[in-house]
Amino acid sequence: MTPAQPTLTYPTKAGPTPIVLHHTRHCLYLHWQPASYLTRCRSSRVPFDWTLNPYRGCWYGCHYCYARYTHEFLELDPVDGFESTIFVKAIVQPALERELRKVHRGQWLAIGTATDPYQPIERRLRVTRAVLACMVRLQGMRISLATKSDLVLRDLDLLQELRRRNRLMVHVTLTTVDPTL
């Protein structure tokens, strides 16, 4: 299968024949209705209590990314497939809001731990923005968001609203060849 193919004709562990939302020469974006939006983290190796990733797979394709192996669970190539086949989580507002009630005051919810929430397709699909809109009623949480994109500025209004009621941290990676930075 190449990303240029606009349809898939085989089942994956993500479900039967995913719906193609968008495709480019290098990337295939597939609709995915997840069983759950949040993942509970009980490991002492990570500082957060919950994670939320609006996408599965990542256009940036960082070779050092620890999340690449997760495509194996979907019977996809973890090396090239991670950045060429991206699953877009369908945000059903009532379902996400119901799940967000599991996050208790003082707990840490991390967004973008296994995929960048602001990869290029986000400009068009606005999945991360929909997630943030569902989160604005949260209060007393620790919320972090990690990205490599300046698109995060688009959602400054929602991030400011989140910051009024929660402790918010936005982590932005700056990549440069300038050794003085």
Image (cartoon, rainbow, N blue to C red):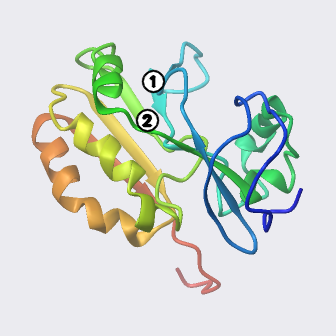
- Residue placed under numbered mark 1 in the picture: 50
Residue 48 visible to the viewer: no
Question: As displayed, is residue 152 above or below residue 99?
Answer: below
Mark 1 residue type = Trp
Disc with the residue nearer the chain's start (2 vs 1): 1
**What's the residue type where badge 2 is placed?**
Ala
Question: Callout 1: 10 Å neighbours few (<14), some, many (20+)?
Answer: many
State the SS at label 1: strand
- 2 and 1 marks in contact (CB < 8 Å): yes
Quadrant location of the N terminus in the rendered image: bottom right
What residue is shown at x 84% (from left), y 45% (from top)? 78
Q: Give the percent coordinates (x, y) of residue 99.
A: 35, 18
Rendered residue at 44%/20% (across/down): 49
Q: Nearer the viewer, residue 24 or 173?
A: 24
Classify residue 21 as left or right of residue 153.
right
Instruction: Give x and y (percent) for residue 104.
Output: 27, 14
Callout 2 environment at 10 Å: few (<14), some (14 to 19), or many (20+)?
Answer: many
Give me the C-alpha separation between circle 2 and circle 1.
6 Å
The image quarter in which residue 24 lies: bottom right
Q: Residue at x 40, y 38 (%)?
A: 91
Residue identifier under label 2: 110
User: Height in image: 18 above or below 7?
Assistant: above
Left or right: where does residue 48 sit relative to residue 164?
A: right
Question: How many marks are shown on the rendered structure?
Answer: 2
